[in-house]
Image (spheres, grey):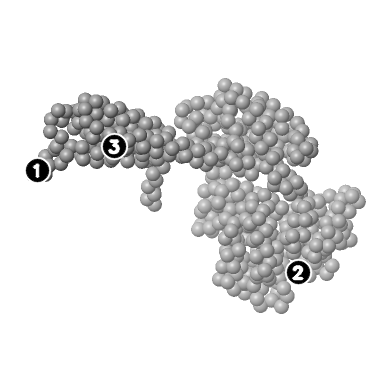
Amino acid sequence: MKKKFSLKDHSSVFVGLLLGFSIMGAASISILGSSHVGGPQIVRIGNAVIPLSSIMGVLQTFSLMLLIIMGCVDCVVGARLAYFVGGYMFVSSIIGMIRTRNLEPLPGLFNCIMALIAIILIGHLMRKARMKSITDYATGTLNNIGFLEYLTKKIKDKKQGSLVYYQINNFRAINDDYGHDTGDKVLKITAARMNKVIGKDGVVGRIGGSEFAILVDGRKDANELIGKMFDSLNEKMIIDNGEFHLDCYIESNAGIACFPKDSNDVTTLFKCADLALMQSMKNGGNQICVFDENMQSRMHYEKEIEQLIKKASDEKYFYLEYQPQFSISDKSLRGFEALIRMKLPDGRKISPGEFIPVAEKSNLIFSIDEFVLDFVTREFAKVINESKEKVTISVNISANGISRPEFVSIVETCLRKNNFKAENLEIEITEYSFEESQEQTVKNIKKLKEMGVQVALDDFGTGYASLARLMNLSVDLLKVDKSLVDNVEKGEVNRDFIKSIGSMGHLLDCKVILEGVETDSQLEFIKNLDCDYVQGYVWGKPMSYKNAKDLIG
């Protein structure tokens, strides 16, 4: 595809051309004026006789126009050059008037003054707009665009340094409990403390949400600085005359990558820092992790997985299995959860735990969401339409996917194209779906329910879900996470906790299903926990479409 021409990408070329034309115009004015000192103030072009002042006025106006354009194209370099050339024209006009003792160039002199004033005003406004475009509104630090530009310049200048990726985990909890205004104040104080600790040894930028990027000078120990920053952030904050302790509410993590040691490419460097951040989160809260060779191998592996995902649909690497869901009371079939798998031509299988996280870091997860939706509705349409019992097919949708404005129309297209009834489709989301775009996610869920599509909240009990949010969403199914089911035999407290989830679900007019039930002894315990359905090896392992179809009957 031919790259679209961009003025921004070629600003230096434009400034050079405009400067050349401007100098030519200014030089022509000077030469013409000098060559006619004391002589006739006319120029003959063929039979035409043109006053010299007219030609000089045209050239001057043209040059000044080019200077103004140059200042608009580049508010830094272009504006400075425009000041220089404009000043030269201004001085030349004064000298010309003195030498010729003629005031005819006086209007041109005022044109120069007006052009210089215009260039100064335009430059000021453009610099102000420029600063606004690269500054984060909530914290006053650099935003994503500004930080990337700053980092790119440092790398191009062959400077050494460290990129720190810092994240406040589960920041959504503050917004939900205290409001977005308080959340913004927390971010502002956090950024101010970061800047105070980093000082002149680096630059802080807010990348998005509760994520920050910090560029640390290569002469400084980034690990030590970030450790001091953690200590500073753990000190109490005074917000609206009340004390707020960030460390008591949520945890933070940081990942560090160095340049040029780890990479000289901005995108790769961010991936390195992100991998280090992920490792620090695995190690626990308030941890710092530095990118190393093992993570480098992991990054190369993820690139390989990314390429496989891109080819998976066309090469048919993806296939689906279906795990049945049963009623606890009578073992009647509720439906199936669609589970995506990947198998390569050489027989090697890549688990979803490997390729889904890679896909979620890019837009590749969207293609997986759409593939599963289309495949499931197409494959099950006939057998479900012919079934006498209502069978629900559940599809997992990523947090990024459910927050897309176009997601509902994608679902509508699949249902209509494949003649699949909306009431037989269930969309599974996780609590973390609200971290992306809570407002858009809620809108999409409400539209899906209006269509007749069911909505399930997966991995319930492992994240942060407020009761108010559940009441507003009116989900159809709560899925209790397997980690809670695993402990059902270990004590009365664990069983009471699951029972309370079941009671809460029924209070909110939704059903409750237990995931990962694998043994008969677990099954015996959960029969009295006020839950409705079970999903697990005890009654059904993931199976092929043929076996699922036979189970429907």
Residue position marked by numbered label 3 in the rendering: 107
Tell me which residue sits at (32%, 35%) in the image.
Answer: 110
Residue nearest the observer in this picture, 190 or 211:
190
Q: Position of residue 465 (x, y in %)?
A: 76, 52
| Quadrant housing the C terminus | bottom right
**Labels 3 and 1: the sequence-earlier one:** 1
Image depth: mark 2 or mark 3 in front: 3
Mark 1: few/some/many CA within 10 Å (<14, 14-19, 20+): few
Specify the quadrant of the image occupied by residue 19.
top left
Left or right of residue 367, residue 496 in this image: right
Left or right of residue 327, residue 131 in this image: left
**Labels 2 and 1: the sequence-earlier one:** 1
Q: Amino acid at mark 3?
A: Pro
Residues at discs 3 and 1 in contact (Cβ within 8 Å): no
Specify the quadrant of the image occupied by residue 91.
top left
Residue nearest the observer in this picture, 416 or 538:
416
Q: Position of residue 522 (x, y in %)?
A: 84, 56
- In this view, the residue farthest toward the top is 219
- In this view, the residue farthest toward the left is 47
- In this view, the residue farthest toward the right is 492
Left or right of residue 437, residue 116 in this image: left
The reply to whether residue 151 is in sight is yes
Residue position marked by numbered label 1 in the rendering: 46
Secondary element type, mark 1? loop
Residue position marked by numbered label 2 in the rendering: 333
Tell me which residue sits at (59%, 61%) in the image.
Answer: 407
Left or right of residue 166, residue 489 in this image: right
Specify the quadrant of the image occupied by residue 529.
bottom right
| Mark pair 2, 1: CA separation | 98 Å
Q: Position of residue 11 (x, y in %)?
A: 38, 39
Image position of 408 with respect to 437: above or below: below
Question: Which disc, if any, is residue 70?
Answer: none
